[in-house]
Amino acid sequence: MASLPLGIKAYRFATIILSPAVPMLLRRRGRRGKEDRDRAAERLGIASATRPEGRLVWVHGASNGECLAALPLMQALVANGIKVLVTSGTVTSAELMQTRLPGGAVHQFVPIDTPAATARFISHWQPDVALFVDSDLWPNLILGAKAQGVRLALINARISQRSFEGWRWARKTVEAILAAFDVCLAQDEQIAARFRMLGAGDVRVAGSLKEDAPPLSFEGDKLAELQTATAGRPILLGAQTHPGEDETILPAHDLLRRRFPDLLTIIVPRHPARGADIAQLCATRTWQRRSAGGLIARETAVYIADTMGELGLFYRLAPFAFVGGTIVPKGGHNPLEPARLHCAVIAGPHTFNSQSAFEAVLGAQGMGHVATSVEIASLAEQLLADPAQAEVLGDAAARGAATLGGAIDKTIDVVNRLLVRHAPA
């Protein structure tokens, strides 16, 4: 404790002082649907499952994106005879993991970052190796695990330029946290350089786990239903959209309807709970919501696909897609998901979360950059008027996606080395 920087000491003291209020906070969040009230004890570090026998690798991802990106890695670890503990902090990620985790893996909610809750968690699970996905860094959890002899790796690591600039103001604090990791596997060289400047030790470039993910799954009967319902209609797909992007896509829809009166616009929001908000934005446009059982009819102008885990359907249905998080500065969602399915990619300027993937896909396409409703409408009109060009663009996107990969093998190699080096405290 004495050797820790002042920022860590202050954080630890504050979390100790605020600990008594945590149960009340969890109950309040539970009433708002932001916590699973039946599993609230997990957030206090009280396990709801027993630790499996043998070597245990703990994988932590903040939410849906991080957990899904790491899912193929978890499957590979289990296939190699390694037990896996997965933690995340959101209700939706827990639901996803419960349905998708392979046998030999168990999900728990990550404990609130107080010294007592994290100590209970680590004491029960006693992982051999901990893998933190992207950059969800909790000081008490990380330093507590390190103190108990857990080998730590920061995998699929990324940090935006904006976050890097912010972290530099707390250099000693960040350096103390990053120093706890035995290795940092960055997504690209630019990100690796940022972590080195912040004080991380063994930093290597491994690529992105998303680059190794298999094509999105789908249910054949549901795809057949959608294909029948949309037969002959031009489709504009907006996938993984955020507030501010629906307001950009809908005017593009209006512009396109002048030439394509039977255009169907499908919006798949990043967060399904926003379905009702998007319906309000539709105003006089006729719409249906998938979560409410709405079906696509000939008069439906906008179809709001506010459900979980069905992107594979819509990327197979549409010849091209606008990928969200790129008009608003969220950094962009995974462009490899549509590209692997030969669905061409349209994206705004904010692609910093998956820079190399966007560069590979958009570079192979030779087009796809947009910034406004008018630009989306203009490019979409070109592709809708010439389906052969859209198909060529989708094939190019797939070729671009195929140039990336290898992160899972590199990560497993690091895990195996850490397991050999692990020695309980």
Image: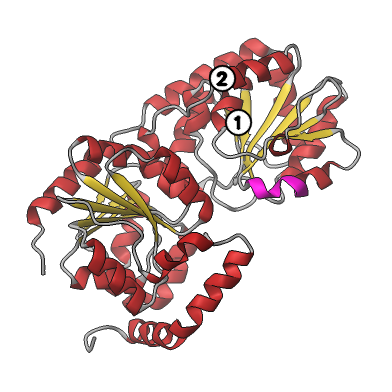
For the C terminus, the image quarter is bottom left
Q: Is residue 396 visible?
A: yes
Q: Secondary structure at mark 1?
A: loop
Query: Element type at marker 2?
Result: helix
Q: Residues within 10 Å of mark 2 (few under 14, many from 20)?
A: many
Image quadrant where one finds the N terminus: bottom left
Give coordinates of residue 76: x percent, y percent.
26, 36
| Residue occupying image coordinates x 79% and y 38% | 250
- In this rendered view, identify the residue nearer to me: 77 or 259: 77
User: What number is the disc on residue 393?
Assistant: 2
**What residue is pinned by disc 1?**
368
Cβ–Cβ under 8 Å for marks 1 and 2: yes
Spot the residue most to the right. 284
Residue 307 position within the rendered picture, expressed as x and y whole percent measured from the top left: 63, 39
Camera-nearest residue between 393 and 101: 101
Q: Is 384 situated above or below 58?
A: above
Residue 407 seen in render:
no
Tell me where the magenta segment starts and ends, as one range: 272-277
Q: Amino acid at mark 2?
A: Leu
Q: Earlier in the sequence, mark 1 or mark 2?
A: 1
